[in-house]
Amino acid sequence: MTLHLAPSKQSPWPYGDPTIHVRRLDSDAVAVLLSGEIDIACANRVREALGRIASVTRDTVVDLSAATFLDATGLGLLCHARNAARAHAGRLATVCPAGQPLRVLRTADMARTLLVRPTLAEALAAIRGLPGLAA
């Protein structure tokens, strides 16, 4: 099942409001695709969505493959999502293959903490501690 949360019509910003797609991968895992700019303009929507997801699934993979921008607020959202997942005995990994979002994650030294991997398969392997891909 896919849940699609379209950009907010009340956004005060003329650009950057991301689209959030949620897809159940299996009985224990959900993928959340964030596209567009992940910044202060969308913080409340993204935080709410990730918090709700953490409360109903064990494994969450945040996919930034379609994200065009990530700032410090976006980093905070990912950390908040990780903490929310852990509070519900869950786990979180991040897909981020390249581009500005990956540079920000590496510069902030968060790639290891947020289990950043280039593909969904590698992120799932990392989150589940499968040998070979989890390192």
Image (cartoon, grey):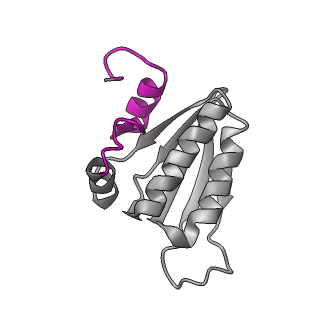
Q: Where, quadrant-wise, is the C terminus in this rendering? A: top left
Residue depicted at x 67% and y 47%: 51
In this rendering, the answer to whether 51 lies above or below 47 is above
13 on left or right of 134: right
Residue 123, given in percent of the width and then of the height, sits at 42, 33
Place residue 29 in its image quadrant. Answer: top right
Looking at this view, is 74 or 30 the one in front?
Answer: 74
Q: Residue furthest top?
A: 131
Q: Is residue 36 visible?
A: yes
Residue depicted at x 36% and y 44%: 110
55 on left or right of 99: right
Q: Which residues are magenta?
A: 108-134
Instruction: Assess whether residue 117 is covered by the magenta stretch.
Output: yes
Residue 104, given in percent of the width and then of the height, sits at 31, 56
Residue 78, given in percent of the width and then of the height, sits at 50, 49
Residue depicted at x 67% and y 43%: 53
Place residue 48 in its image quadrant. Answer: bottom right
Q: Is residue 1 visible?
A: no
In this rendering, the answer to whether 120 lies above or below 104 is above
Residue 57, given in percent of the width and then of the height, sits at 68, 33
Residue depicted at x 36% and y 47%: 96
Instruction: Assess whether residue 79 is covered by the magenta stretch.
Output: no
Q: Where, quadrant-wise, is the N terminus in this rendering? A: top right
Q: How many marks?
A: 0
In this rendering, the answer to whether 20 lies above or below 15 is above
Please name the predominant secondary structure of the magenta segment in the image: loop
